[in-house]
Amino acid sequence: MKILTGNSNRPLAEAICASLALPLTKASVRRFSDMEVFVEINENVRGEDVFVIQSTSYPANDNLMELLVALDALKRGSAKRITAVIPYYGYARQDRKSGPRTPISAKLVANLITSAGADRVLTLDLHAGQIQGFFDIPLDNLYAEPVLARDIIERYGDESGTCRDLTIVSPDVGGVVRARQVAKRLDADLAIIDKRRERAGVSEVMNIIGDVKGRRCILVDDIVDSAGTLCNAAVALRDAGATSVAAYVTHGVLSGGAVARVSTSPIEMLVTTDSIQATEAVRVSQNIRQLTMAPLLAEAIRRVSEEQSVSSLFA
């Protein structure tokens, strides 16, 4: 088994390799003067089981192209099997036609990854479950819930591990299933925020379904981008009588002024995973921290390589 990485999240790849006690495969991923992507594998990969770790986060197009070129280089280097490990699957929010003459870019990216030479895909918390059906190759979708739930228990549980006065909140109707699963793990109450989105990137909180008065509330979502939805939800929860508000989100995109928006919001702590490499603004923020997914991803990679069950990780 060999592990290869691009430039999108090298610290995560190194942590995964440390968990597997394997070195990173030597490779050169660079740009020509006109910014064309060039990948050269500096080790023999013929007949090897190779895993390429690459999130397609900002800059999304550059990182996606690095992944595609690396897959092609491995295919032409006669690798036995190539698995694209994509902790954050970019373009996932474009999973359906949102209007006339609009693309389904998540499907297009799936086609590109398959055509480039991937034999299977390993990813984390897909934005929409139906994206699994966009691939004609095997796809394993891992879940961050066990890692998030463990941290919540450590932070909010008593000596017996019971989280009293805790309510898990979905910031929109679309995330109810995810929030319900976390609430079930913690034996906590569930609340839902109904919001109306007037236009892309702008959300207006309309109503809270459930009782949050006097409760410690934790917002759970898969992606935080501009953080407008989370911050508006936090304001609504505090106005409804919540004693505190925190947020646990798998993918911390945090584009634009998101970090500043979170720092001035009622959110006491925003916890994300390291599926996307933290920017300098995130690293120095006082109310944003990251949980590592390296042990979970490493174990999933080991099981894929040894032809063992991956779904049993979440049984």
Image (cartoon, grey):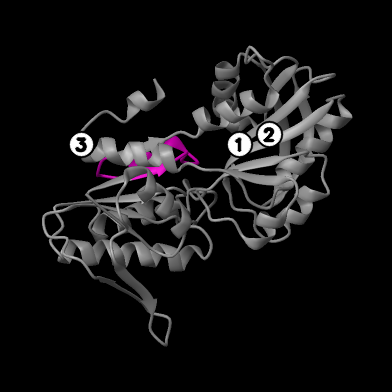
Q: What range is drawn magenta here?
A: 122-138
Q: Residue furthest bottom?
A: 33
Q: Is 109 in the magenta?
A: no
Q: Earlier in the sequence, mark 2 or mark 3?
A: 2
Q: CA distance from mark 1 to mark 2?
A: 7 Å
- Mark positioned earlier in the residue sequence (1 or 3): 1
Where residue 217 sits, quadrant-wise, is: top right
Mark 3: which amino acid? Glu
Q: Tell me which corner region of the image, top left, top right, bottom left or bottom right, holds residue 73.
A: bottom left
Residue drawn 41% across the image and 36% down it: 142
Q: Residue at x 65, y 62 (%)?
A: 280
Q: Earlier in the sequence, mark 1 or mark 2?
A: 2
Q: Which residue is mark 3?
A: 306
Tell whether label 2 touches label 1 (CB within 8 Å): yes
**At numbered mark 3, what does the secondary structure look like: helix, strand or loop?**
loop
Residue 83 higher or lower than 256, as above or below: above
> Given this view, does label 1 or label 3 mark the residue nearer the observer?
3
**Image check: 164 left or right of 117?**
right
For mark 1, does the 10 Å Cα neighbourhood hold few (<14), some (14 to 19), or many (20 or more) residues? Answer: many
Q: Which residue is mark 2?
A: 171
Q: Where residue 268 is drawn, which disc sits there?
A: none
**Residue 186 falls left or right of residue 238:** left
**Where does label 1 land, which residue?**
221
The x, y position of residue 78, in whole percent, is: 12, 61
Q: How far separated are the C-alphas under marks 1 and 3?
A: 32 Å
Image x and y of residue 79, in percent: 16, 57
Amino acid type at circle 2 is: Pro
The local secondary structure at tag 1 comes to: strand
How many neighbours does mark 2 have within 10 angstroms: few (below 14), some (14-19), or many (20 or more)? many
- Residue 94 visible in the displayed image: yes
Task: Tell me the SS state at disc 2.
Answer: loop
Look at label 1 and name its amino acid: Asp
